[in-house]
Image (cartoon, rainbow, N blue to C red):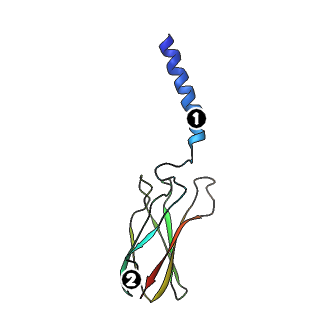
């Protein structure tokens, strides 16, 4: 009987603590996401790999690349259980400074706006 009461107390404590742990830092839920572009600097026509960690594992990352000429391209990258996004390539088109920003939508509410998580610049010479 004592063992059953002890198990019940542990379960009640664990269930009560679960909401407090939701959304906290951990694998893929860090508050300081990062993004990098490799190689940096690059040359026109080069394939550049974008990667980073510290993302929420519950939704994909949205990568937005702002070109020096004013164009913007956007695509999604999967986020692994580690909180790191799948490395994604893109090809540079022109010389100048590219700005790379990574956004993610929060889990709740479902129609929430994407939030900026990390950004970096890429020089193309």
**Mark 2 and 1 residues: CB-CB less than 8 Å, in contact?**
no
Q: Is residue 114 left or right of residue 26?
A: right
Residue 102 visible in the shown view = no
Rendered view: 51 above or below 98: above
Specify which label sits upstream in the sequence, 2 or 1: 1
Rendered view: 28 above or below 6: below
Image point (56%, 41%), residue name: 21
Percent position of residue 107, x then y: 57, 53
Question: What residue is shown with label 2?
Answer: 42
Kindly state the secondary structure of the residue where label 2 is placed.
loop
Q: Residues within 10 Å of mark 2 (few under 14, many from 20)?
A: some
Name the residue nearer the viewer: 111 or 85: 85
In three-dimensional space, the C-alpha distance between marks 2 and 1, rounded to whole angstroms, equals 48 Å
Q: Residue furthest top?
A: 1
Image point (37%, 86%), residue name: 45
Q: Is residue 46 left or right of residue 99?
A: left
């Amino acid at each position: 009987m004592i063992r059953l009461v002890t198990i019940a107390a542990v379960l009640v404590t664990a269930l009560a603590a679960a909401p407090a742990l939701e959304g906290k830092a951990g694998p893929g839920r860090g508050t300081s996401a990062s993004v990098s572009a490799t190689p940096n600097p690059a040359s026109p026509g080069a394939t550049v790999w974008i990667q980073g960690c510290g993302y929420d594992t519950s939704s994909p990352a949205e990568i937005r690349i702002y070109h020096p000429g004013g164009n913007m391209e956007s695509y999604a990258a999967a986020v692994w259980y580690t909180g790191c996004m799948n490395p994604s390539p893109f090809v540079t088109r022109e010389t100048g400074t590219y700005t790379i920003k990574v956004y993610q939508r929060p889990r709740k509410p479902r129609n929430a706006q994407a939030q900026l998580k990390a950004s970096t610049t890429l020089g193309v010479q």
